[in-house]
Amino acid sequence: MDGIKEFDLLNSPLEGTNLIEASAGTGKTYTIANLFLRLLLEKSLTIDQILVVTFTEAATGELKERIRTRIKQALETFSLGKSEDYFLNELVERQKSPALSLQTLREALRSFDQAAIFTIHGFCLRILQENAFESSVLFDTELITEQENIKREVVEDFWRNHLYRASPLFIHYTINHKLTPEKLINMLGNRIDRPYYKIIPKAEIPDSSSLEKEYQACFEEVNKAWNKAGAEVENILRSHEGLKKDYTKNITTWIQNMDQFLSSGSNKLSSYEAYNKFTSSELKRSVKKNYSPPEHPFFKLCDNLKEKQQALEKAFGQQVVGLKYKLFNYAKEELERRKEANNVQSFDDLLIKLRRALSGEGGEELAKAIRSKFKAALIDEFQDTDPIQYDIFKKVFSKGKSILFLIGDPKQAIYGFRGADVFAYLDAASQVNHRYTLKENWRSEPDLITAINTIFGNKDHPFVYKEIKFQPARPAEKQELEVLKLDESSRQPFQLWFLNAVKLTEPGKSIPKNQAQEMIFNAVAGEIVRLLNLSRKNRAFLGKRPLKERDIAVLVRKNAEARMIQKALSALNVHSVLYSTESLFETYEALEMERIIAAIVEPNNEVFIRAALSTEMIGVKGEELENLLKDDTGWDKWLIKFKEYHNLWNERGFIVMFRRLLAELTVLTRLMSLPGGERRATNVLHLTEVLHQVSIDKKLAMTSLLNWLSEQRASGRGRKEEYQLRLESDENAVNLVTIHKSKGLEYPVVFCPFTWGGSKLAKSTELVEFHSKENNRQLTLDLGSEEEERHRMLAEKEQLAENLRLFCVARSRAEDRC
């Protein structure tokens, strides 16, 4: 492979395997559309011989429209013989037969419905269906959008098979360590859909029965000794002159803890902190200088019990690791078996099956068939690839006379949580024939581009890994931007804010995180108000027009941060709109809907009725409810009303009933009067629509629909796109967007207040996931190996690199000021 060169859209050769690194704002989609044109005209390919693949339905729609528009523009240019578009003019000049080119473009436009522009899953599905025999895929296999229900069944079966027969001691250990089926489901995540994923260590489930017996025998010894000599032990401790005050003042507490611990019995594994104060080692630490610790045989027994408990807990820890390892293997096999039995497949199965078909017997014939159909392929957003996707493209297009362009930007690889793997991109980058970059930035103003070049260009490895390089951009020559001006002058386009800890806390101490966040929320809101006030005084302009709320975006890492910014802006009477990937079922309105529907399902249950009335949707206050319960006539009216809703639902369906409830009880009007009312009303209407659709699609009766809603809320599911929060009215509002959601968007003024998030993994909650250097950077999950601490450091290094890429994506949304 040669070095990285600037891509020449008109002259770079259309051959072999190519990688184009396209930083944000450098015209990636424009490049793809023009490459498509060149392939039509220079390689004489038909519209259906050029494969274009991207990663979302939205991006697919945009690419289709942009490519179609570009073909129309080219057709017009070739018809007139000239254009103001430099690229199209040059294209006309170099064509030997303009008449043939016109014919090619007309045919491409006429047959554009046959254009092969797909998502990665759409491409795999098409190939599997067209080559069902070679891929061994049944024609009538149902494609399911999510497999969480099947996965949950698998985990719950595993839990019953292994935990229901476990010893009481081990059960208590799992309870103390919060090991639940839900936690195991979250651990599996989408990891079992990745054949390249490695789990370490290969742990067996050890037999801990002998250690349990030793612990229980020792426990009984301690219990017996305490019953016999407890008063004597207490007297020794209270009368010992050498014990420190911190110990003696708490002796009563230590005695009570010991009584409580022993009363729980030997089948319950409590924390040894309950009796630790009676161990010889602890007593030795608790005496004053030049004093000997108190002595009694009971203290030695406590030492022995602690030793037995620690040995048992170590074995139980190994047992949990063994169970988790076994679950991964069981879940992979069982999930595939159950899907096959039900004749269903997930989107990820499409990739796995196509790769399996290409790797197995007859794989080369299948690859040839795909190559004969698609002479060229343009792969968009390639930084979001994974080893399976890259392997598919490599097996198909790396041979023969295929033309393959991979277009992406490793600096914008931020979707690891969805399965994207930046190391798969780097592997591909090391194997391509030609590697290019796009250097002209069409989005940001020149001074902002210079600032970004300065920040990232002065570091050898600004994105941690040396393979991810920073290529300085330059402003596009004919760039036309509305420059932000304050008081008739342009201000510094890139600004860094520092929170001065010295002024807020004692020297050497850091500011508590929640305090720092509160200050940042208020500072950002205050600066936005300042800019808008300047605009109202005709002192802040974008080009020739005043700066508006919709020109400003605040990019955050978490939805909770967006809500706090929204709260701060609302307090200053600034309207904002939240773009979120948060689930509809995580909202407060979902909780209130569940309470109201429960009361309608069981209108004779007065507890449910009271809960429904006390919601903010219905709005009966506490004092009103108390008075209502004393008023039989008033209370009966509510009971009758809920029975009417129950009957209406039975007779005419959920949607008719709930629309009447919303109208009769003026729910939306009430919500609109509350803080964040527009957001809340939007959520209620969205929930109403979702529940109606589910009741129709799944043919759910009242109780079943209520149970479905409860499951969505309790399980944290409902991540489908149609279950994400909808946008309330965004006309003239400040945009609050998560960085992941902001990809592809751009705003004149951008605030990035939380790019300083930490890269440390919480030992108790976060899984150690890293790419193993020893195994060719294979994605690996360490459940508790001897190398776990070293692997944790590698995982934190990867987390730091991703945080830097998140910052890179956030700052690149800005056109004028960041």
Image (spheres, rainbow, N blue to C red):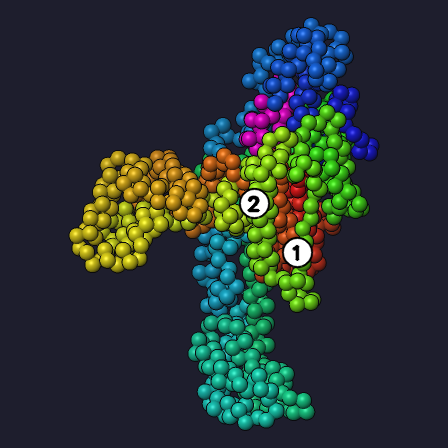
> Can you tell which quarter of the image residue 305 is in?
bottom right
**Residue at the outermost right position:** 2
Q: Residues within 10 Å of mark 1 (few under 14, many from 20)?
A: few
Q: How many marks?
A: 2
The location of residue 603, given as percent across then percent down, is 24, 49
**Would you name the residue on which mark 1 appears?**
499
- Foreground mark, 2 or 1? 2
Provide the secondary structure element on which disc 2 rests.
helix
Front position in the image: 188 or 354: 188
Q: What type of secondary structure mainly makes up the magenta span? A: helix
> At 72% from the left edge and 18% from the top edge, which residue is drawn?
87
**Residue at the outermost front position:** 537
Membership of 495 in magenta stretch? no
Q: Which residues are magenta?
A: 46-65
Q: Residues within 10 Å of mark 2 (few under 14, many from 20)?
A: some
The location of residue 271, given as percent across then percent down, is 52, 73
Provide the secondary structure element on which disc 1 rests.
loop
Q: Assign the N terminus to one quadrant of the image.
A: top right
Can the viewer see residue 627 in this picture? Answer: yes
**Would you name the residue on which mark 2 appears?**
529
